[in-house]
Amino acid sequence: MKQLFILFLCVSLFACKNNSEANSVAQDALSLAEKAYSEKPDIATASKYIDELVDKIGENVDDKGQMISLSEKAYQVAKDNKIASKQRGFLFSLIKEDYQNAATSSRILELANQMSAIKRPGTANILYKALIDNFGNSEEAKIAKSKLDPGVTDLNNYIINIGEEITKGEVDKFGINRNAALKYVDACEAYALGYPNSPAAPENLYKAAEIAKTIRTFPKLMSIYDWVIEKYPNHERTPTIFFLKGFVLENDLGNDDEAKKVYETFIEKFPNHGLRDDIDFLLEHLGKSEEEIRKIIEQKQQEKVQQ
């Protein structure tokens, strides 16, 4: 599919030239932003430089080495200029994408400290515990021991307790405490971040996705779906995640083209899965309204009765 797409782009010299020029413009924008920042390093030039680096990261999602290199650069710029929210974002990405890096323990500690500073103790405690469990001989683990809530011993129960707050306190019309729901999603992600090789990691991400969908935080939901798909391709939940991602793209985000790609990828990867018939149905009726689909289902049911 990718080769066909490249061939299509390069059918004419003009098309290839335009594509090359677009890449050149993007590179020039990054170079200009880098130059401006080096000449006058302040919040304004740093933010512009980071924005250009993020765009470049988006262009290199299939090149993990390049993506990590760009993220490290963006993180350092954010850190040097004390842009805390962006620091956290890049730390999160670097830990997730490059867990084997020698800097991971220090990155986890920094992220945990920042989460503690913004009053996210649940997330911070899970990351501190991960440092102690997975980097026990490190200086970072020693620091984590002094910061960890002494009541945090069993992380499974700890995360369950955080989840129980979702239906308590100030709830919306659906009975959901949105702030508590966000904290639960953070906690589930923190577990997968700190314990990427644990069998509980994809399970926690699946639970986080369910809550993210309930409170309709779709960017977060899509990132969790992609996390499971990329890092746990053979997990029993992964086919369901593909199905749900396509369904959300189609029905909640109105992106039929991307939904079609997800459905087709599902068929390619899981041709004999129990959800195959549902995927075939969704593909066949992609773009149709709920009313149209309802009528089709009713007609098929009627035909079965008449047989």
Image (spheres, rainbow, N blue to C red):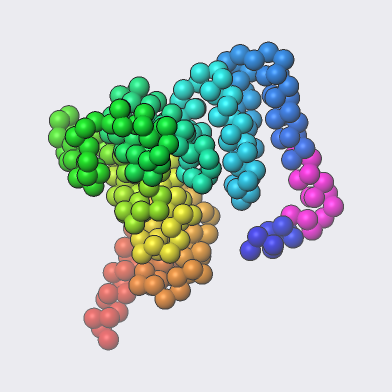
Is 247 on the left-hand or right-hand side of 207? right
Q: Position of residue 113 (x, y in %)?
A: 38, 26
Residue sitting at x 58%, y 34%:
72
Q: Position of residue 268 (x, y in %)?
A: 51, 69
Question: Which residue, as the protein is rendered here, is positioned at the far right?
Answer: 13
Q: Position of residue 235 (x, y in %)?
A: 39, 62
- The answer to which quarter of the image holds residue 175 is top left
Q: Foreground: 201 or 48?
A: 201
**Residue 110 in sight:** yes
Q: Foreground: 282 or 182?
A: 182
Question: Which residue, as the protein is rendered here, is positioned at the far bottom?
Answer: 307
Q: Foreground: 90 or 240?
A: 90
Is 74 on the left-hand or right-hand side of 262? right
Vertical order, 203 against 69 (above or below): below
Chief secondary structure of the magenta portion: helix
Asked whether 21 falls inside the magenta stretch, the response is: yes
Q: Position of residue 40 (x, y in %)?
A: 68, 13
Is 269 on the left-hand or right-hand side of 121? right
**For the N terminus, which image quadrant?**
bottom right
**For the C terminus, which image quadrant?**
bottom left
**Residue 123 in sight:** no
Asked whether 45 falls inside the magenta stretch, the response is: no
Residue sitting at x 38%, y 44%:
134
Q: How many marks?
A: 0
Question: Which residue, as the protein is rendered here, is positioned at the far front?
Answer: 137
Residue sitting at x 50%, y 27%:
86
Q: Foreground: 24 or 63?
A: 63
Magenta-colored span? 9-22
Residue sitting at x 45%, y 70%:
270
